[in-house]
Image: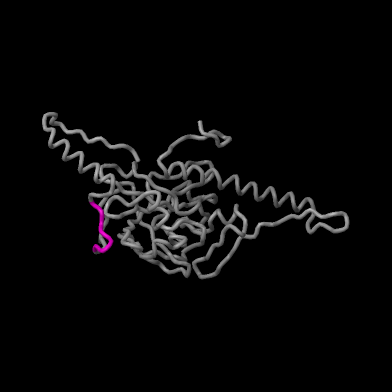
Amino acid sequence: MRPFAFITSDATDTGSRRRRFAVVALSVLGVVGATPAGAAPATSVPYSDPQAVGYIGLCDAAGHQVTSGSMSAHPFAWRAVSSVAAPAPYNDDWRTAILLAYQPQQFLTSTEWSGMELTASSRYSNPAHPMTAATAKDYSLHDVTEAYKPLWDNFYELRIYLGTKNAPPYETTYPALGIQVTGSTWHAVGGGPVNCTSGTSTSLETIVLPTSTTTTTTPVGETTTTTVPVTTTTHATTSSSSSPSATVSIVISIVALAALAIPTIAYTRRRAHGVEEPTDESGDDQ
């Protein structure tokens, strides 16, 4: 969190300065503007974000749009769908999307808010409606509260950032959705209808991680897992289950997919936490 210093133009008004500084300090700590657990849900967000264009719709495992849920559910939502199309070149064949949660803070602009990713990057089929896919290993909203407590009326802002080959993540504009926490549940504020089955989306976690690590549920209710080929070493008395050339091809394919996905995910983790450090080609920080 970036430190905030309140400066008043009247240097002689010591009492006023102290009172105003106290308000700022309490706000940063989440005391001012907090919404009690039993308060009525909000119908509009209390903050403004000039970079938010369009909205996000959330979907369950059966392909139905949802507007509320449990704070402890893993994942937070199985699919997130953008109401706006991906701009060029982020609509090409290498297009990806990732879902993040940000912490609105009074006295800070939306570009200064802290946040974290809710999913890994996802490949999606329909550039008119970018979408992210989650796995059972992805974060719940409760996980987000442990890292970034909601400070402004118990609100988070969801964002979808886009990516593609040989380009930085697209953050100039993004679809967004307000999420308010009330006790052990959350509900969406704002947004609108989306078609949860307007395309397909696959988390890169299911491509680069073993089957035992991730399980993905498609929006039509089917459970699918990613199978990673396993090559075994045999003794002279047994025969190999695959030819050496086939084994080499499989290993090269897995390494290539991992090389494509990991830099994007790593950059987003640093950027979501407010760290904008360039990396060299080896991936080490400068």
Marks counted in the figure total: 0
**For the point 44% across and 65% down, which residue is it?**
196
73 or 85, nearer to the observer? 73
Residue at the top extreme, as displayed: 11
Give the vertical position of 260 relative to 133 (above or below): above
The chief SS type of the magenta part is loop
Residue 116 image point, x, y percent = 42, 48
Give the vertical position of 277 relative to 236 (above or below): above
**For the point 31% across and 61% down, which residue is it?**
182
Residue at the right extreme, as displayed: 237
187 or 218, nearer to the observer? 187
Side (left or right) of 60 relative to 256: left
Magenta highlight on residue 38? yes
Give the vertical position of 7 relative to 124 (above or below): above
Side (left or right) of 75 relative to 250: left
Side (left or right) of 58 relative to 45: right
- The residue stretch that appears in magenta: 33-39
Magenta highlight on residue 160? no
Residue 65 image point, x, y percent = 40, 67
**For the point 80% across and 54% down, which residue is it?**
243
Quarter occupied by the N terminus: top left
Residue 188 image point, x, y percent = 33, 61
**For the point 54% across and 69% down, which residue is it?**
222
Residue 184 image point, x, y percent = 35, 63
- Specify the quadrant of the image occupied by residue 178: bottom left
- Specify the quadrant of the image occupied by residue 64: bottom left
Task: Identify the coloring.
Answer: one colour
